[in-house]
Image (tube, grey):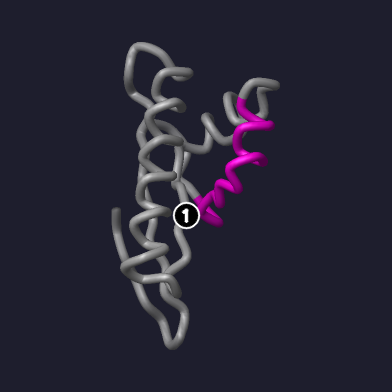
Amino acid sequence: MIAAERGSDRIAVEIKTFVGASDLHDLYEALGQYLMYRVHLRYSDPERRLYLAVPQDVRLGLLQEPIAVPAMDTFGIALSPSTRSGR
């Protein structure tokens, strides 16, 4: 996790590469880690906003699939505003 501040804005970004054997398993791990970090930040740094950064092909592919969309919505996963293409 990377933390940054600009003025009063405080963010943390969890970066995931999705290079494992299964994108679905990588998603499972990414969501679990993201949620654990969010719980931690809730108590240690509640003003910091957490984002998940993923490769552009994952954002436009896997995260648009019927299995991912409801999970991202249900858990309120905030994707980073920009990600690099490729893995």
Nearest the viewer among 35 and 8 is: 35
Name, please, the residue furthest toward the top: 21
Name, please, the residue furthest toward the front: 43
Residue depicted at 52% across the width and 37% down the height:
56
SS at mark 1 in the image: strand
Classed neighbour count for the residue bearing mark 1: other residues with Cα under 10 Å, few (<14), some (14–19), many (≥20) = many
Looking at the picture, how far across and down is residue 52, in whole percent?
46, 48
Residue type beneath disc 1? Tyr
Left or right of residue 70, residue 81 in this image = left
Residue depicted at 46% across the width and 27% down the height:
27
Left or right of residue 72, residue 17 in this image = left
Looking at the picture, how far across and down is residue 45, in whole percent?
36, 71
Q: Which residues are magenta?
A: 68-82
| Quarter assignment of residue 6 | bottom left
Instruction: Please tell me whether residue 46 is drawn above or below residue 72 in the rendered image.
Output: below
Q: Which residue is mark 1?
A: 51
Instruction: Please tell me whether residue 86 is drawn above or below residue 20 in the rendered image.
Output: below
> Quadrant location of the C terminus?
top left
Residue depicted at 41% across the width and 44% down the height:
34
Looking at the picture, how far across and down is residue 30, in whole percent?
40, 34
Q: Is residue 3 magenta?
A: no
